[in-house]
Image (spheres, rainbow, N blue to C red):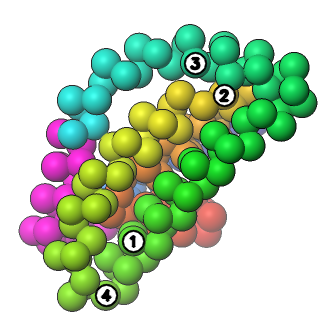
Amino acid sequence: MVTGVNLALHQNAFNTTLEEDMHGFLTKSAFLTSTGIATLLTPISLLNPVTTIVFGFMGSITFKIALIPLFAIALVLGLFLFGSSWLWIKAPVLRILLFLPGILIAPIATRYVGLLPFYGKVDIRLAAINICMIWPLSFSLYRRTVDG
């Protein structure tokens, strides 16, 4: 029940962020280019069930210690996306510098997060994927989700 509510809240925040904050030529270009690259990486998503089972089993056996390096990589990618999104919003002058690294890292981070096991926490998985998918507005989505 709680997971269903959280899923609806995350999806509502995602849609609201797209509707209200997606303005400006460079912001739309970054989002559309990142989405296009993510579409090209879609075949990687076919591995999601396999990697979730393998990494989930590996994490269960090792009490999730073996997954620390994998989640550390996801954390670094997420911090980059948050930081660059914050800079995108606060310092529009830097958008040209953030454009190329952002459109390359966001789709890769989206697919990478999808490959990790989340042990039944579908709402957390959706939130992580949405934050990667909506770059350069990741920080806006986070703020909208946290503030309600």
Disc sitting over residue 28 in the figure:
none
User: Dot 2: few (<14), some (14–19), or many (≥20) neighbours within 10 Å?
Assistant: many
Find the distance from the CA under tag 2 to the CA under tag 1.
26 Å
Q: Quadrant of the C terminus?
A: bottom right
Residue 137 in the image: above or below residue 118: below
Magenta segment's dominant SS is: helix
Counting residues from the N terminus, which is met first, the one under dot 4 or under dot 2?
4
- Between discs 3 and 4, the one toward the N terminus: 3
Q: Is residue 25 visible?
A: yes
Q: Does 46 sit left or right of 70 as displayed?
A: left
Quick check: 119 above or below 108?
A: above
Image depth: mark 3 or mark 2 in front: 3
Q: From the image, tell me which residue sits under label 1.
A: 84
Q: Secondary structure at mark 1?
A: helix
The amino acid on which the numbered mark 4 sits, given as a three-letter code, is Ala
Q: Position of residue 18 (x, y in %)?
A: 31, 55
The residue carrying pointer 3 sits among few (fewer than 14), some (14 to 19) or many (20 or more) residues within 10 Å by Cα, namely some
Label annotation for residue 91: 4
Q: In the image, which disc is placed on residue 117?
A: 2
Q: Earlier in the sequence, mark 2 or mark 1?
A: 1
Disc 3 secondary structure class: helix
Q: Residue at x 37, y 22 (%)?
A: 44
Residue 12, relative to residue 38: is it above or below? Answer: below
Distance, label 3 to label 2, CA atoms, is 8 Å
- Per the rendering, the mark at residue 51 is 3
- The CA distance from mark 1 to mark 4 is 10 Å
- Residue bounds of the magenta highlight: 21-36
Using a 10 Å C-alpha cutoff, classify the residue at mark 1 as few (fewer than 14 neighbours), some (14 to 19) or many (20 or more).
Answer: many
